[in-house]
Amino acid sequence: MDLQLTGQHVLVTGGSKGIGLACARGFLDEGARVTLVSRNPAHLAAAQARLGADASRLATVAADLCDPAAALAALDTAEAGLGPVDVLVNSAGAARRTPPDELQPEAWHAAMQAKYFSYIHMIDPVVKRMGQRGRGVIVNVVGNGGKVASPIHLPGGAANAALMLVSAGLAAAYGPRGVRVNAINPGLTLTDRLREGMAADARLQQISPEQALQRAREKLPLGRLAEPEEIANAVLFLASAKASYITGAILAMDGAVTPMVV
């Protein structure tokens, strides 16, 4: 299937690892030009080496997206290098998973900075520029914790819930200007972040991280965790012209572990 992404400029936040890196690889395979944004220059260099694309199709920008000025500067750099951003994929930031008895007010503030504001600081200037140009797509990789409360992910889940509302609201606000906005809620996915979640879950259940992972796997109807590439495939579809009438959607990708209709 031709997703009609050839030549488009895709900016991927959190693009140096995990789901973000899988998205970058998928867009490059479809002929797009990609800018990766991440805080760590070393991680960006490693991602660039793994992806193997030349400078005409792949660029990197190091920026801490918790800082709105840094996010805006990163966007300006990306567009100066590869042109106006056609597609924004937000996959940066992750709130630390913490058992409820260990929570302090600082953890709630940190979660909003790490997940919510790191997305908002890039979404805000991008969606306005897209609206002025009359076209564009935003796909926010959020997380299932925003719809199903987890005792070890309450601050992060609150940030995710806020991002879902932002995604739906911006889809309605900017649809008349030619911009589509959707969100994806992955469940357990085989990334580096999974280990932190399993460690927190293990402390809550007073078991080993390996036991926590096995228990989590046993609850999954599909019998396995998601691969980053599987989440990326959904991102690519939503970013493509094949999804031209899909906007304001919140796509669950938890392997049916939580059967629900809303």
Image (tube, helix red, strand yellow):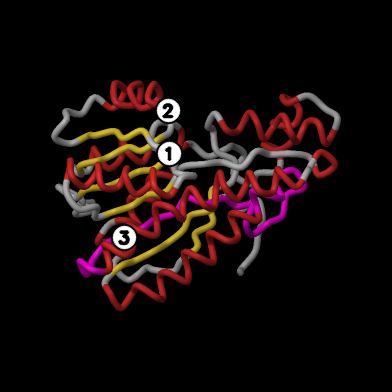
Query: Which residue is label 3 attached to?
Result: 137
Cα separation, mark 2 vs mark 3, equals 26 Å
Q: Quadrant of the C terminus?
A: bottom right
* Residue most extreme to the front: 69
Cα separation, mark 3 vs mark 1, equals 17 Å
* Vertical position of residue 40 compared to residue 172: above or below: above
Q: Are dots 3 and 1 in contact, CB under 8 Å? A: no
Secondary structure under tag 3 reads strand
Between 259 and 13, the residue placed more toward the observer is 13
Q: At x 24% / y 24%, what residue is drawn?
A: 52
* Vertical position of residue 127 compared to residue 198: above or below: below
Query: Which residue is label 2 attached to?
Result: 40
Query: Which residue is label 1 attached to?
Result: 14
Q: How far across and how far down the image is residue 60, in percent?
A: 29, 33
Q: Report the magenta residues as a range.
A: 132-157
Q: At x 15% / y 47%, what residue is drawn?
A: 7
Note whether residue 229 is visible.
no
Magenta-drawn stretch contains 139: yes
Secondary structure under tag 1 reads loop
Q: At x 42% / y 62%, what residue is drawn?
A: 182
Give neighbour class at mark 2: few <14, some 14-19, many 20+ (Cα, 10 Å). some
Q: Looking at numbered disc 1 in the image, what kind of residue is underneath it?
A: Gly
Q: Looking at numbered disc 3 in the image, what kind of residue is underneath it?
A: Val
Q: At x 74% / y 39%, what residue is drawn?
A: 98
Between 67 and 202, the residue placed more toward the observer is 67
Q: How far across and how far down the image is residue 183, in percent?
A: 46, 58
Q: In the rendered picture of this protein, how many numbered marks are placed on residues?
A: 3
